[in-house]
Image (tube, grey):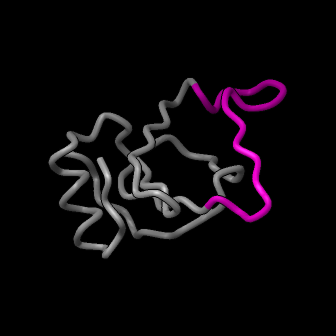
Amino acid sequence: MGVAIPAVSVPFDTIRDPGTYVCNWNGYLLRVPSGALGPGPGRVINLIGAEPLLITRISADPELPVSHARQLASDLGLRIRF
């Protein structure tokens, strides 16, 4: 199973570590593999809005099973829509 980590909400554009995240604004699951954060100019995905789009990292494992991700998110009181 995935490794549980302390949950901290951060803006999407500050993601620095691979893992499984929950999008605070809509409850969707976001998987960030290590290859998406490699060196080089810019990110693979950019989300831009008037307010920071906060995400909460729930595991260091980007392949965390969905059922376990749901349980971790629920335990943290996060909105779940996945």
Q: Where's residue 33, x and y in %? A: 48, 31
Residue 75 located left or right of residue 32: left
Q: Where's residue 53, x and y in %? A: 64, 59
Up-down relation of residue 44 to residue 27 (above or below): above
Residue 42 part of the magenta-drawn span: yes
When asked about the image quadrant of residue 50, the answer is bottom right
Up-down relation of residue 40 to residue 31 (above or below): above
When asked about the image quadrant of residue 39, the answer is top right
Residue 80 located left or right of residue 60: left
Residue 58 located left or right of residue 71: right
Q: Which residues are magenta?
A: 36-53
Residue 81 part of the magenta-drawn span: no
Q: Residue at x 54, y 68 (%)?
A: 9
Secondary structure of the magenta portion, mostly? loop
Residue farthest to the bottom?
77
Up-down relation of residue 33 to residue 50 (above or below): above
Q: Where's residue 75, x and y in %? A: 23, 72
Residue farthest to the right?
41
Q: Residue at x 40, y 49 (%)?
A: 28
Q: Where's residue 19, x and y in %? A: 43, 44
When asked about the image quadrant of residue 52, the answer is bottom right
Q: Residue at x 67, y 32 (%)?
A: 45
Task: Using the image as rendered, state which of residue 41 and residue 70 is in the foreground.
Answer: 70
